[in-house]
Image: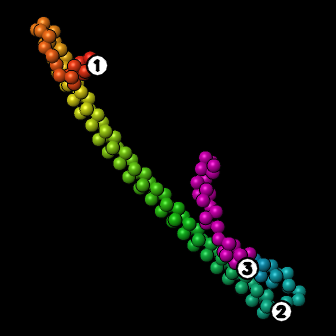
């Protein structure tokens, strides 16, 4: 559905979501909020440590998430290229089968026309002679079916 709106990248966005990365970023934000919320009662070294730890968690979570997104993008591109390759192979086989069937049908039609022409010639010859020359059963049946 999102493809219709020009957002093909969001169709498989769920594959790029990383819960550990999201947890790391949210924990980092929580540490920073705790550091700023505790300005009045936390010692200076604890606030700096919380801010540094929070910043480190945010950067690590964002890095991990971007790596996860890149991996999901590459996997999606690989799957799309494999699907396209398989479709190309199916199309080539289908074209080959279509050509061979068309050639076989053309040969069969030419053979049938030649047989019909031969039978008509035999019928014309039999009618011209006026003689009641007997034909074998297969030729007689085929003449009746014309």
Secondary element at tag 1:
helix
Q: Which residue is mark 3?
A: 28
Other residues around mark 3 within 10 Å, as few (<14) / some (14–19) / many (≥20): many
**Residue hosting label 2:** 43
Determine which of the numbered discs, if any, sits on residue 30 in the image: none
Name the residue located 78 percent from the left edge and 78 percent from the top edge. Answer: 30
Give left or right: position of 84 versus 136.
Answer: right
Query: Which element type, helix, strand or loop, lies under badge 2?
Result: loop
Marks 2 and 1: CB-CB under 8 Å? no
Above-or-below relation of 110 to 24: above
Q: CA distance from mark 1 to mark 3?
A: 89 Å
Q: Pointer 1: what residue?
A: 145
Residue 121: percent from left, percent from top: 16, 17
Residue 47 vertical position relative to residue 28 in the rendered view, above or below: below
Label 1 Cα neighbours within 10 Å, binned few <14 / some 14-19 / many ≥20:
few
Q: Marks 2 and 1, how far apart in space?
A: 108 Å
For the point 22% across and 19% down, which residue is it?
140
Q: What span is in magenta?
A: 1-27
> In the picture, residue 128 is in which quadrant?
top left
Residue 38 among magenta residues: no
Image coordinates for residue 112, horizontal then vertical, percent: 24, 27
Could you say which is closer to the camera, residue 15 or residue 63? Answer: 15
Residue in the foreground of this view, choosing between 44 and 3: 3
Is the magenta region chiefly helix, strand or loop? helix
Eyeballing the image, is 107 above or below 45? above
């Amino acid at each position: 559905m999102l493809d219709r709106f020009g957002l093909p990248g969001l169709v498989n966005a769920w594959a790029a979501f990383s819960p550990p990365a999201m947890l790391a970023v949210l924990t980092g934000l929580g540490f920073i909020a705790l550091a700023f919320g505790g300005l009045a009662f936390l010692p200076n070294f604890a606030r700096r440590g919380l801010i540094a730890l929070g910043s480190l968690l945010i950067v690590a979570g964002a890095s991990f998430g971007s790596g996860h997104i890149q991996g999901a993008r590459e996997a999606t591109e690989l799957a799309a290229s494999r699907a396209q390759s398989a479709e190309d192979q199916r199309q080539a086989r289908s074209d080959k089968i279509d050509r061979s069937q068309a050639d076989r049908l053309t040969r069969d039609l030419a053979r049938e026309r030649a047989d019909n022409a031969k039978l008509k010639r035999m019928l014309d010859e039999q009618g011209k002679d006026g003689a009641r020359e007997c034909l074998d059963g297969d030729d007689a049946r085929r003449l009746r079916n014309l």
